[in-house]
Image (tube, helix red, strand yellow):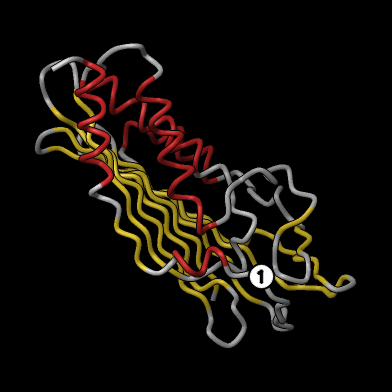
Amino acid sequence: MSDSNRRRVLRAMGALALLPLGWTQAIAAPRVMVSFPQVPFRLRRKLVRSLKDGATIEVVREWSCRFEKLGAGARMHGHQIAVSVEAPPQLEAMAAIEQGRNASGFLPLELDRTGLIVDWSHEASPGVGTAVRQAIAMLESAVGDTGGKQTSSEFVMSVGKTAAEMVSQIPRDLLFPTPGRQVEARPVELAEGLVGSYEVAIATQVDPATGLLRTFERRVTTKVGDSSRLSSETWEIA
């Protein structure tokens, strides 16, 4: 089988792994005006990274936030109130730096009347409903840009680097997203004769009364043989 035919077969196999669970109609629905809660709330973000030795790094931050009316929309003010970092002993110095960092630079945020972030440096970031497709496109580009088959270690590094770029892109509709869940996976033939895979899963829940975010989770899982690596990001509002 030629390399081009093999890639087509792998792509077809990957298409079978698409599991749309509730976004197909919601994506096409127009956004509506939202009601911004007047009570303070906590915004929480948890990042998790698997390491090659099976250990993990976990960083959790919390911000105290509130909405202020701004025309037909709102401005969200906030400041960091808590941070915790769990990391292996060999990464203690890096963990200490992260522990002392104030990650409130993205605040305040301005939102339009439908809850979309405006005047935002990540304006090109996909919305929650299209984020899986965008992520798969980024990963396909990262894996395929080498011009040949990657080794298993190169593959894991490529996916890990791209996953880190993804979580730096906050969806414009993060605070008032369309609820749903979507999973998509792709197999990749590696240089050692192995077949690896990467999977992107995104799930979102909202408050049924206001449409405000409850949880948004984005997970990228890389598998080679019996081993797997995880990069995940979870946003929560309480």
Which of 10/128 is in front? Answer: 10
Q: Which residue is mark 1?
A: 31
Which of 184/62 is in front? Answer: 184
- What's the residue type where badge 1 is placed? Arg
State the residue at coordinates (25%, 16%): 149
Tell me the element at label 1: loop
Residue closest to the far right: 71
Looking at the figure, which quarter contains the C terminus?
bottom right
Looking at the figure, which quarter contains the N terminus?
top left
In this picture, is 14 found above or below 147?
A: below
State the residue at coordinates (35%, 61%): 20
Q: Is residue 125 left or right of residue 49?
A: right
Q: Give percent across and percent down for residue 63.
A: 62, 63
Which of 162/91 is in front? Answer: 162
Q: Quadrant of residue 226?
A: top left
State the residue at coordinates (73%, 77%): 33
State the residue at coordinates (70%, 78%): 34
